[in-house]
């Protein structure tokens, strides 16, 4: 059997693995679940490459947003030989943090980073699975600004265009897929 292995086909196959779940976690929300994509070795690999490629050679550390951003950040960091940093939901990090709060499509949250994990001026790539309203990444950018990181950009696997999250970000955001 002949199997197409070109990049566009591999990306289209990865995109087809994203599940849409109606009314989760609250009525009216169509939740985009990337766990089937992440669980597929070939799809995860092509997405990890696609999210890192636009920023190649321009970052020292990948910061992942809890929780699904952690999966991407660790994989991109290992593949590119860079460090990885967790930006966590409030109350999880044990040492002194900088925190920022934000609104989500379905609630409100606070994220934090350790104050001294990274030196000022470090080149940071922010990664998450989904860009919805942009509240999460905007809060991460504010943390980066307060800690004097050089944020080179934001990468997400899936951008929900209708929620216009891109408008909330003053930094370049690259999306592998749009819906
Ligand atoms: O662009 P926004 O409107 O900020 O939404 C995007 C964020 O929402 C989801 O995380 P969620 O807060 O549900 O947390 P989780 O990954 O811990 O489940 C998603 O993984 C992003 O982090
Ligand atoms: N619709 C959605 N699907 C997945 N993650 C989200 N984060 C915010 N809105 C979301």
Image: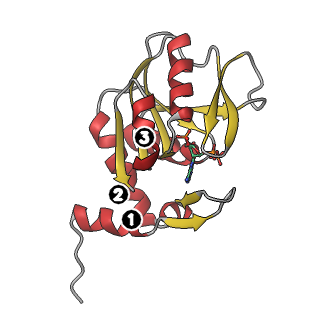
Is residue 12 shown left or right of residue 18? left
Q: Residues within 10 Å of mark 1 (few under 14, many from 20)?
A: many
* Residue 76 percent coordinates (x, y): 43, 43
Mark positioned earlier in the residue sequence (1 or 2): 1
Residue contact at pointers 2 and 3, CB within 8 angstroms: no
Secondary structure under badge 3? Answer: loop
- 72 or 106: nearer the eye? 106
Residue behind mark 3: 164
Instruction: Point out which mark residue 14 bears.
Output: 1
Mark positioned earlier in the residue sequence (2 or 3): 2
Residue at left 32%, top 49%? 50
* Residue 110 percent coordinates (x, y): 69, 29
Q: Nearer the viewer, mark 1 or mark 3?
A: 3
Residue contact at pointers 1 and 2, CB within 8 angstroms: yes
Q: Please, is residue 128 above or below residue 118 in the view? A: below
Q: Please, is residue 139 above or below residue 12 in the view? A: above
Q: Nearer the viewer, mark 1 or mark 2?
A: 1
Q: Please, is residue 14 above or below residue 126 in the view? A: below
């Amino acid at each position: 059997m002949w199997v197409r292995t070109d990049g566009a086909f591999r990306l289209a196959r990865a995109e087809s693995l994203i599940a849409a779940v109606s009314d989760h976690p609250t009525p009216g929300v169509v939740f985009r679940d990337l766990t089937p994509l992440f669980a597929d070795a070939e799809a995860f690999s092509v997405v990890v490459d696609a999210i890192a490629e636009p920023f190649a050679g321009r970052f020292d550390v990948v910061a992942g947003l809890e929780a699904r951003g952690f999966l991407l950040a660790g994989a991109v960091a290992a593949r590119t030989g860079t460090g990885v940093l967790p930006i966590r939901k409030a109350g999880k990090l044990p040492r002194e943090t900088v925190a920022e709060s934000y609104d989500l499509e379905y609630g409100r949250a606070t994220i934090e980073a350790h104050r001294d994990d990274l030196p000022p001026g470090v080149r940071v790539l922010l990664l998450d699975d989904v860009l919805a309203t942009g509240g999460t990444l905007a809060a991460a950018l504010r943390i980066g600004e307060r800690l004097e990181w050089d944020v080179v950009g934001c990468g997400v696997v899936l951008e929900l265009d209708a929620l216009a999250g891109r408008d909330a970000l003053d930094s370049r955001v690259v999306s592998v897929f749009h819906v």
